[in-house]
Image: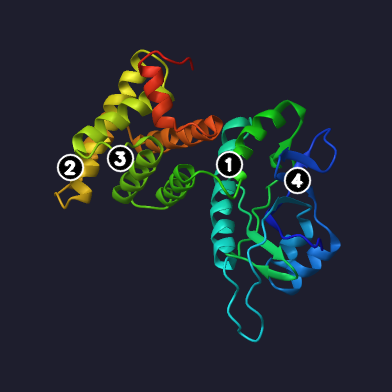
C-alpha cells in the first residue's frame, strides 16, 4: 500500500488492446492492475463481493491531498478535512460514473450497460467506501469494453471530469443528471433543468421566463447543429422550461400536458432532454476554465468559433 492517500474508483473488467499498463489518462488519473494486497484489503473489509473481485483485474487510481486523519476504532472523531475528503470521493465517483457510461455508450459499436464500480479510497491504512457496489460483468468476451490507441484519445477527453476539484457547475450538473435517470418523468424534468441551469445559468437574470429563454438559447447554440436542428432543440427546451416552472411553483401539471409533450416529440422526449444535458456536460469539461454559458454567448455574438 502506498504511503500517499489515493483512491480506487471502479474496479472492473476492461480490455486494453495494444496498451501497456499503467495507462495514464490525465495528470491525476491512471488505469493499472489491482495489486494482491488491494485484493486482500477489499475482500477482508467486505468492500467488494469476493467473486466479483476475483475477476476484476484493473482499477482506476486518483490521488488525493491529505485532509486529516480518519476516525479511529476507539470512535475518536475524524480530524478536520476528512469529511471533505469523503465528499470529494463521492463527487468524483459521480463524475466517473458519468464519464465511463457516456463514453462506452456513445463511442463503442456494441451496446453496453453502464459500468458500475464503487468508490474506495485508502488513506494511511484506513479505508472508506461511500458506496458498496459491485461491478457489472460483461455477458461475453465480445461485450467486454476495451481501450485501444484509436479510442484512447477520445476517452482521455472524458477524464477531464475525474478531478476531485472539478468546477462546481460540472459537479452539480452531473449529480442532477444522474438523479434524473432514476426519477419519474416530473422529477426527471426538474433534475435535468437544474443541471442545465448549473451549466448555462446566469445569476444576473432573475425572471423565470427570461432564464428559460436564455438557457434554451445557449443550450441550442452549443448542443445542436445550425439550422432546423438548433431551432427544434430551442423550441423543445422552452416547452420543457414552461412545464418545469409549473412543477416547481405549485402549478397544476396534469397528465394530459405531459402526454401532449410526448405526443409532439415522441416517447423518447426525456431521452432527448437527457442526451442534451449529457452533451453539454462533456462540452463544459472540454472548455476547462471557461464557463459554458459565457462561451455560448460568444458564439451567439460571433466572437468565437466552435
Residue with the mark numbered 3: 203
Residue under numbered circle 1: 161
Report the Cα–Cα distance between label 1 and label 3: 24 Å
Label 1, residues with CA under 10 Å away: few <14, some 14-19, many ≥20: many
What residue does disc 2 label?
A: 256
* Residue under the image location 42 percent in, 36 percent down: 277
Q: Earlier in the sequence, mark 1 or mark 3?
A: 1
Tag 4 residue: 31
C-alpha separation, residue under disc 4 versus residue under disc 3 = 39 Å
Per the image, label 2 sits on a secondary structure element best described as helix
Mark 1 or mark 2: which comes first in sequence? Answer: 1
Residue 239 shows in this picture: no
With 14 as the anchor, is 254 left or right in this view?
A: left
> Label 4 to label 2, Cα distance in Å?
49 Å
Q: Pinpoint residue 144: horizontal percent, then vertical percent.
A: 71, 42
The alpha-carbon separation of the residues under discs 3 and 2 comes to 33 Å
Residue 227 shows in the view:
yes
Q: Position of residue 28 (x, y in %)?
A: 70, 45
Lower sequence index among marks 4 and 3: 4
**Image position of 100 (left or right of 257):** right
Amino acid at each position: 500500500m502506498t504511503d500517499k492517500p489515493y483512491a480506487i474508483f471502479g474496479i472492473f473488467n476492461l480490455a486494453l488492446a495494444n496498451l501497456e499498463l499503467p495507462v495514464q489518462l490525465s495528470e491525476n488519473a491512471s488505469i493499472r492492475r489491482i495489486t494482491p494486497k488491494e485484493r486482500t484489503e477489499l475482500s477482508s473489509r467486505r468492500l467488494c463481493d469476493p467473486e466479483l473481485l476475483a475477476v476484476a483485474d484493473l482499477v482506476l487510481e486518483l490521488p488525493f491531498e491529505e485532509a486529516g486523519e480518519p476516525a479511529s476504532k476507539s470512535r475518536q472523531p475524524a480530524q478536520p478535512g476528512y469529511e471533505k475528503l469523503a465528499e470529494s470521493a463521492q463527487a468524483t465517483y459521480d463524475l466517473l460514473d458519468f464519464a465511463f457510461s457516456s463514453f462506452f455508450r456513445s463511442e463503442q459499436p456494441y451496446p453496453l450497460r453502464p459500468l458500475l464500480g464503487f468508490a474506495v479510497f485508502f488513506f494511511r491504512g484506513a479505508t472508506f467506501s461511500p458506496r458498496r457496489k459491485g461491478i457489472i460483468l460483461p455477458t461475453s468476451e465480445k461485450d467486454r469494453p476495451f481501450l485501444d490507441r484509436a479510442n484512447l484519445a477520445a476517452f482521455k477527453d472524458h477524464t477531464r471530469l475525474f478531478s476531485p476539484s472539478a468546477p462546481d457547475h460540472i459537479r452539480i450538473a452531473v449529480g442532477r443528471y444522474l438523479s434524473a435517470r432514476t426519477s419519474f418523468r416530473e422529477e426527471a424534468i426538474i433534475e435535468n433543468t437544474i443541471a442545465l441551469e448549473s451549466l448555462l445559468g446566469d445569476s444576473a437574470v432573475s425572471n423565470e421566463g427570461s432564464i428559460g429563454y436564455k438557457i434554451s438559447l445557449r443550450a441550442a447554440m452549443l448542443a445542436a447543429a445550425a439550422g432546423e436542428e438548433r431551432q427544434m432543440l430551442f423550441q423543445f427546451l422552452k416547452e420543457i422550461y414552461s412545464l418545469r416552472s409549473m412543477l416547481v411553483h405549485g402549478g397544476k401539471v396534469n397528465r394530459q400536458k405531459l402526454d401532449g409533450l410526448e405526443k409532439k416529440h415522441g416517447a423518447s422526449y426525456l431521452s432527448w432532454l437527457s442526451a442534451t444535458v449529457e452533451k453539454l456536460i462533456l462540452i463544459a469539461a472540454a472548455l476547462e476554465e471557461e464557463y459554458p454559458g459565457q462561451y455560448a454567448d460568444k458564439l451567439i455574438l460571433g466572437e468565437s468559433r466552435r
